[in-house]
């Protein structure tokens, strides 16, 4: 059976990269004595698939990975066993057995919601709260997106599903699919360029970013309905 596990990542653990997080959970599962399924062959490994790598330095309230189990006592039992192995900053939030027709976590990701705050003393000098509506009012927001091999011009506007103020933070819902995958820093760089006319570039360490949730699309491409990955 396939099981989807939701966890949060905060504090010092935000500086641990994706590959080390994978190894961390592999060891935690072994210590928990959970009956996880292993691949066959000369070098068996746990059958595990993460939904979406989280960038180093980002915190999250909604990370997911799938594992295959040979047997389980209950979802609550898995949650309790894993939480007993977690270090400070890591917490298992939910465990759910998936229906057979549900795709894996990585292929299911369609969007992600982020909360973005400015570090103390790093707030922009321009009136950023007043400029947000003007930024979103543009028909197109063209940026240059860097890839591993090249760079290409991209219109961000269709990929920004929501963007609004919440106290002194910006909350945004953006495309996180394999075809789109818009990083929140790219949106903020475009916002800075528009609001300050390139006079005040975004600093590398100006922002504190938390991924609030990761979503699948339960609707269509034309009329998306975003549902958290542990609710599909």
Image (cartoon, grey):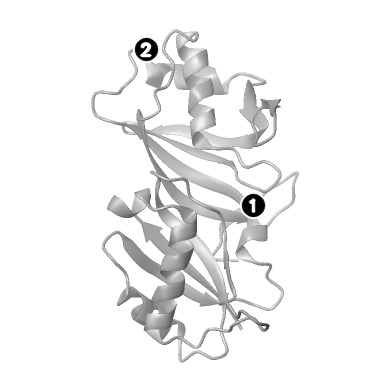
Question: Which residue is located at x 74 percent, y 51 percent?
Answer: 220
Residue 125 vs 63, above or below: the answer is: above
Sequence-first disc among 1 and 2: 2
Q: Residues within 10 Å of mark 1 (few under 14, many from 20)?
A: few
Q: Position of residue 181 (x, y in %)?
A: 62, 42
Disc 1 or disc 2, which is closer to the eye?
2
Res 140 quadrant in image:
top right
Is residue 76 visible in the rendered image? The answer is no
- Secondary structure beneath dot 2 equals loop
> Residue drawn 29% across and 31% down?
119
Q: Residue at x 44, y 59 (%)?
A: 20
Q: Quadrant of the N terminus?
A: bottom right
Residue drawn at x 57%, y 77% is: 45
Q: Secondary structure at mark 1?
A: loop
Q: Residues within 10 Å of mark 2 (few under 14, many from 20)?
A: few
Of 132 and 151, nearer the camera is: 151
| Viewer-side residue, 37 vs 220 | 37
Q: From the image, which quarter does the C terminus lie in?
A: bottom right
Q: Nearer the viewer, residue 112 or 54?
A: 54
């Amino acid at each position: 059976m396939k099981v989807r596990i939701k966890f949060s990542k905060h504090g010092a653990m935000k500086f641990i990269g994706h590959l080390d997080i994978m190894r961390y959970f592999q060891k935690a599962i072994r210590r928990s004595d959970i009956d996880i399924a292993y691949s066959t062959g000369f070098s068996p490994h746990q059958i595990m698939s993460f939904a979406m790598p989280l960038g180093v330095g980002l915190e999250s309230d909604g990370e997911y990975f799938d594992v295959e189990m040979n047997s389980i006592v209950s979802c609550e039992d898995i949650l309790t066993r894993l939480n007993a192995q977690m270090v400070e900053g890591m917490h298992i939030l939910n465990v759910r057995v998936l229906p057979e027709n549900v795709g894996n976590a990585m292929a299911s990701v369609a969007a992600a919601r982020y909360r973005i705050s400015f570090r103390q003393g790093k707030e922009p000098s321009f009136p950023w709260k007043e400029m947000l509506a003007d930024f979103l009012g543009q028909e197109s927001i063209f940026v240059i997106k860097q890839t591993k091999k090249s760079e290409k011009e991209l219109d961000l506007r269709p990929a920004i599903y929501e963007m609004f103020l919440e106290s002194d933070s910006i909350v945004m819902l953006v495309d996180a699919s394999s075809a789109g995958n818009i990083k929140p820093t790219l949106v903020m760089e475009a916002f800075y360029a528009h609001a300050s006319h390139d006079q005040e570039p975004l600093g590398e360490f100006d922002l504190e970013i938390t991924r609030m949730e990761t979503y699948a699309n339960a609707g269509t491409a034309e009329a998306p309905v975003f549902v958290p990955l542990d609710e599909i």
